[in-house]
Image (cartoon, coloured by chain):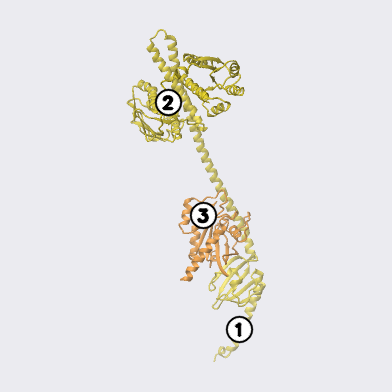
Chain colours: A yellow, B orange
Amino acid sequence: MSGYTAHKGEYLNQAMVDVARIAKITRQLYERQQFAYLLVDHNWSVIEASANLENYGFGDVRVGDDAREAIDFLVGLDSHSTLDLPIVLSPSQNPVHIVLLPEDESLTVVLMDASRDYEQQQLVQQKANENELLLAQQRQLMADLEQTQAALVTKNTELREASRLQSSFLSGVSHEFRTPLAALLGYVDVLGERLLSQSQEESEEQLKVIRRSGRHLLSLVENLLDHGKFDAGEVVLNPQAIDLQGICDEVHAMLHQGAASKQIALEFDTTPTPLPSCLIDDSRLRQIMLNIIGNAIKFTDEGKVQVIAQCADEQFSLRIRDTGMGISKDDMQNVMRPFWQAPKNGKVGTGLGLTITERIVEMMGGQLKIDSELGVGTTVDITIPAPLIELDQPDINSNRAEHIGARRYLLAEDDPDIAALLKLLLVEQGAEVTHVENGQQAIEIAEREEFDVILMDLQMPVLDGYDATKSLRDRGDKTPVLVMTASAIEADRTRAEEVGCDGYLIKPVAVHEVLSLADELLQNQSAV
Amino acid sequence: MQKRKICMVGDFAVGKTSLTQRFVNNSFSEKYLTTIGVKIDNVVVDDTKLIIWDVAGRDSLSPINTNYLSGAAGIVMVADGTRPETVESLHTLAEMVVEKIGQVPCVVAINKYDHNAFKLDDEQQNKLTSQGWDIFKTSALTGDKVPELFQVLNNAIGAVTSVGEEA
């Protein structure tokens, strides 16, 4: 028998004593080293718990209880697996290092104080994270800065382009104005010198040039003013019953001479013929046609310009087809931009006609499309809503037309040339005209004499047309006041209406417009 | 009462602690205090006690300790809508979660929706929703969409549990 076998029972007893002693020492170590422990079976039933467990905020743990009911962090964990949780903030906010140590029959959960690790990591991690956030902010700021710089570069480029367009525009405007002015003044000089020596036919031809040049100048001014008015939202449509065929004939008459002088054909084809009457702003329609057909003539040096006007289903459609130089694909993207002009095409202009035309068409609820091929020609298609309407037939038995000129007019106008011209034209129509130079004189003479209509300029020295009209109305004078002004601004018209003006005409005014509107005002007055 | 462990994961300073505190205590602090390790809170939702593990965010010094994810029934992945890189990192975070605990219900909070610099473009959003995740544009500051975030996750966990029980 070996010594071990002989003393087996003694050794076992000693071993059990040693184990118990080690367990006791371990428990003492737990307690002394601020360890806490929890011994559970694999169903989480508490076998034993150190007394200091409650120091970590895990109190009220009793033998036999389900440990997960009292200790939240055990929820979901596997009682058979080893697990190391370096830092857990316990309910008492103590940082705890938790280790799960499974054995065959049980699981020991060891909790150790981790305050020191927590504080050290907190210090380092906080600084590291704050630095990282600052770096991220810095990167973002740099990115924002680069974006702003890029935006500024783009803006700068746009400003340069705007400046270039402005210079080009001014140059174009200058040329556009000088050309008809040169023709107009030149022919006026010729007429002045040769009126008596040349034939009447020659004089009439020269007068046609003067009239055409004047109208061209007027359309330029209207386009320029319209551009500003569109930007200010001041353009107002004034639809009225018009004779479409009459408008087409008028436009043809105005432009055919220009086409003929370039030796190109200007063909008008209307369907049906005559075109019906409809409700549309006639001055805007005229402007659209003059701009687009005028452009077609301008950019066509050979061949023809064909205008097809149709009215069907309450839509007025215009197709203007030319055999001109056409537009390249690149330029097509720019043709609607204000002030833009195709480079190197040898033509100048304001670069506004097409822009304004498109805006007017859109305002009318219509559409404008351009199709073009470089070197072949351009086709512009325009459709505009045109509700059909019956025009009032003129009363042929009425002798009203013979008498509308025979009125007594008070003309308040500070420009002596305009006043003299208008007086001349009105007197030719049988009117009596008394001319004064400002609003004050108009009031004074209106107190002494009776007039059928007062023709009132707005901008005058001493007393302007607004104050003069207001003064007349305040004094009970109900004589119709017809404004004649160079201002096409809607706000001026509104103000004039507010002070009591009855009609509004924009210079230059044709005498038949004055007579017609004056008659209308008097008819309205007598009806009231 | 039934208990469920859910974990808040995401990069550092995305607002995991703020979302948790808004939901649990209805409070918010402007001061940034980085989380070390994990902070455990609980809140009762629909007779279920949610044990919320607010896990320290991933940062340049240390990855997320996936031991904290053990036993989680659901995950709230959080990103900062003012830092696009934190949205991108959600995908690698998701891979890490699946590798550790397998497929569990998951919702995504793109936090700081109240901030001017918040930006979540369509491409990012589509990439997230293509994973089958519910996306919430949350604000811990205002509390916007915070209750919904946890409610949807709890419902999803409940649905998965029911299916498991039926099986």
Looking at the rendered structure, whether the residues under marks 3 and 2 are on a common chain is answered as no
- Mark 1 closeness class: few <14, some 14–19, many ≥20 residues within 10 Å: few
Q: Could you tell me which chain the residue with mark 2 belongs to?
A: A
Give the percent coordinates (x, y) of residue A44. Answer: 57, 75
Circles 3, 1 touching at the beta carbon (< 8 Å) = no
Give the residue at x 48% y 33%.
Answer: A161
- Real-space Cα distance between discs 1 and 2? 115 Å
Q: Which residue is mark 3?
A: B87
Separation of marks 3 and 2 at Cα, in angstroms? 56 Å
- Dot 2 crowding, Cα within 10 Å, few <14, some 14–19, many 20+: some
Please name whichever residue, A123 or B154, is drawn nearer the observer in this view of the structure.
B154
Measure the C-alpha gap from mark 3 to mark 1.
Answer: 59 Å
Q: Amino acid at mark 1?
A: Met
Q: Up-down: is B55 above or below A52?
A: above
Q: From this viewpoint, is residue A507 visible?
A: no
The numbered dot on residue A16 is: 1
**Which numbered dot is residue A348?**
2
Left or right: A54 in relation to B139: right
Count all numbered tags in the image, as a single digit.
3
Q: Position of residue A271 (x, y in %)?
A: 34, 30
Question: Residue A457 placed where, x, y %?
Answer: 55, 21
Q: Earlier in the sequence, mark 1 or mark 2?
A: 1
- Disc 3 residue type (three-letter): Val
Callout 2 amino acid: Val
Q: Secondary structure at mark 1?
A: helix
